[in-house]
């Protein structure tokens, strides 16, 4: 089982180093996209770690904009250009951390080889709060003066936007674990359907929808499992999920997920050590 971990990071190089060391395996490589707004120098020491590669084409990632989609695509392209035939591409942030052992993660993916693990709730009748993201115009990805006033003007006078190519919109969480073939399909699809890329560039938070939608409307749909293997706690009702502390150790230990987010050593570093003490146990993954 060969896994390419594609990690999007913008801060905390020491935390990123710990994540890489934790996931180290002879069958794993690490592709790091460091936000172009971030000084890359503090991260350069990571080049000395085995199996670590830096994505050369860096993007200035803006929250809610298409730039994070482009950063992911850049990562896909560099992974696909390598001579290594990966079974899976695992998309992580620098604030993620595995809550199962690396051996367990590799064995799990070997057992379910070919399955795609991502959230894909239909927008129209399940994830309805996302409807304005695609039916209204959003100019987050464009650096133009007065863009929010322009947005309001456009949305006041133009009809609602419609999904191109008759696509059924699905999604939710940005983070996923998919096969190399699925990632290759996404890259090829966007290159041959520039209208789809343009549509999502005018959407809000397209990273939570574009990849999922492309695969859901393809032959890969039969291989999709509506579970992204991540434990994420949105109970605080904030735009970002809860940052885990030592108080969350029990719930993380008892989770059947492979990864969790998010963590910050400046908030609580003890939680990393506690997770590392978790013994490897077999859990039954609930497929939804």
Image (spheres, rainbow, N blue to C red):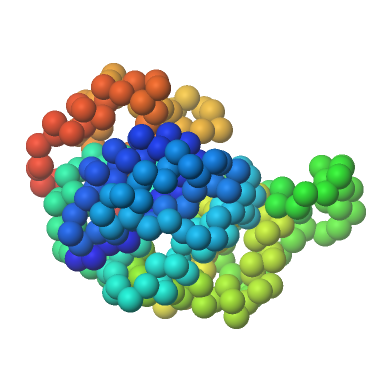
- Seen in the picture, residue 81 relative to 244 is either above or below; the reply is below
Residue at x-position 68% and y-position 72%: 195
Query: Dividing the picture into quarters, in which one does residue 124 lie?
Result: bottom right
Q: Residue at x 64, y 70 (%)?
A: 196
Residue sitting at 71 percent across and 57 percent down?
202
Q: Is residue 23 above or below residue 269?
A: below
Camera-side residue: 115 or 37? Answer: 37
Of 150 and 98, the residue lying toward us:
98
Quadrant in which the N terminus appears: bottom left
Where does the image place residue 18, in percent across and percent down from the top left?
Answer: 29, 38
Image spot of residue 121 (x, y percent): 47, 54
Quadrant of the rendered structure where residue 221 is?
A: bottom left
Pick the front one: 45 or 285? 45
- Image x and y of residue 282, in percent: 10, 47
Q: Is residue 131 left or right of residue 7?
A: right
Outermost bottom residue:
192
Instruction: Residue 267 in the image: state x and y as whole percent.
Output: 39, 21
The answer, for residue 14, to whether it is visible in the render is yes
Left or right of 168? Residue 98 is left
Instruction: Check the image and report above or below for 286 versus 114.
Output: above
Q: Dividing the picture into quarters, in which one does residue 52 lie?
A: bottom left
Left or right of 247: which side holds 153? right
Say whether residue 108 is visible.
Answer: no
């Amino acid at each position: 089982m060969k896994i390419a971990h594609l990690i999007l990071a913008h801060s905390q190089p020491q935390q990123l180093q710990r994540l890489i060391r934790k996931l180290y395996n002879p069958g794993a490589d690490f592709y790091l996209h460091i936000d172009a707004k971030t000084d890359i120098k503090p991260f350069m020491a990571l080049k000395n770690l085995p199996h670590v590669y830096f994505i050369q084409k860096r993007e200035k990632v803006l929250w809610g904009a298409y730039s994070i989609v482009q950063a992911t695509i850049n990562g896909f392209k560099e992974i696909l250009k390598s001579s290594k035939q990966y079974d899976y591409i695992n998309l992580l942030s620098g604030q993620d951390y595995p809550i199962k052992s690396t051996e367990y993660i590799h064995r799990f993916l070997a057992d379910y080889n070919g399955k795609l693990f991502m959230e894909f709730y239909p927008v129209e009748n399940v994830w309805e709060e996302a409807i304005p993201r695609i039916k209204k115009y959003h100019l987050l990805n464009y650096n133009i003066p007065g863009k929010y006033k322009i947005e309001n003007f456009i949305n006041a006078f133009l009809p609602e936007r419609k999904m191109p190519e008759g696509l059924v919109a699905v999604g939710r969480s940005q983070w996923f674990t998919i096969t190399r073939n699925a990632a290759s399909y996404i890259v090829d699809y966007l290159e041959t359907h520039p209208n789809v890329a343009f549509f999502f560039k005018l959407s809000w938070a397209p990273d939570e929808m574009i990849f999922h939608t492309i695969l859901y409307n393809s032959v890969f749909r039969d291989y999709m499992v509506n579970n992204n293997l991540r434990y994420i706690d949105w109970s605080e009702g904030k735009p970002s999920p809860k940052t885990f502390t030592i108080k969350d150790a029990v719930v993380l230990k008892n989770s059947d997920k492979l990864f969790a987010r998010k963590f910050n050593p400046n908030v609580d570093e003890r939680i990393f050590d506690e997770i590392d003490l978790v013994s490897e146990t077999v859990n039954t993954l609930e497929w939804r």
